Amino acid sequence: MAQLLVRHLDGDVKAKLQRRARRHGHSTEEEIREILRNAVRGEGGTRAPFGSRLAARFAVVHLDSDVALPVEFPGGVAMTIRLTEEQQQAIDSAGSTPPQVVDPRTSAAYVLIPADDYETVRELLGEERRQKAIRKVALRNAAGRNQEEP
């Protein structure tokens, strides 16, 4: 087995990798190996269209059935849906752009992304909210100190 040493890794990146590994139930080292495997999985070969990969991934939960089945995943419970041939072709033709779907009842738009990407985005948004809260408190404290000065 080959080894790889990564130097000058930011502390927050390491902490996020550790949290992600805990969430997936394995070591940080295994998490990094999995990330690297996924990053190069499609290199050097032809890749099936997204809709076909999506259908294949969910074939074990009867994606082609007319009944929506609950599926457990790390972020909660998802419902499987039956894709029409037209929907699958639209997803296949989307290329690298994540497909969007619109709820006809509410007109709410959704973007379909892999669960791991969603978790990464969710963590980043949480971190951004924390940073905004810290800045807000710091500005409020600074404003209070300015008012105290004669």
Image: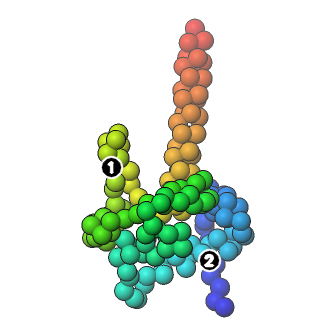
Nearer the camera: disc 1 or disc 2: 1
Crowd rating for badge 1 (residues with CA inside 10 Å; few <14, some 14–19, many 20+): few
**Position of 35 relative to 87 (above/below):** below
Question: Which is nearer the eye, 22 or 112?
Answer: 112
In depth, the one of 85 and 136 nearer the eye is 85
- Residue with the mark numbered 1: 102
Quick check: 93 left or right of 110? left
> Residue 28: x and y, percent?
69, 68
Q: Quadrant of residue 138?
A: top right
Colouring method of the image: rainbow
Give the amino acid type for the residue marked by disc 1 in the picture.
Val
Q: Which mark is residue 131?
A: none
- Residue 126 appears left or right of 46: right
All told, the count of numbered labels is 2
Instruction: Give coordinates of residue 47: x percent, y percent.
Output: 38, 82
**Residue at left 66%, top 91%?**
1
Q: Disc 2 residue type?
A: Arg
Q: Earlier in the sequence, mark 1 or mark 2?
A: 2
Q: For the point 60% across and 53% down, which residue is it? A: 76
Determine the CA span between mark 1 and mark 2: 36 Å
What secondary structure is found at the residue carrying circle 2?
A: helix
Looking at the rendered structure, which numbered label has been put on residue 33?
A: 2
Indicate the quadrant containing the C terminus: top left, top right, bottom left or bottom right. top right
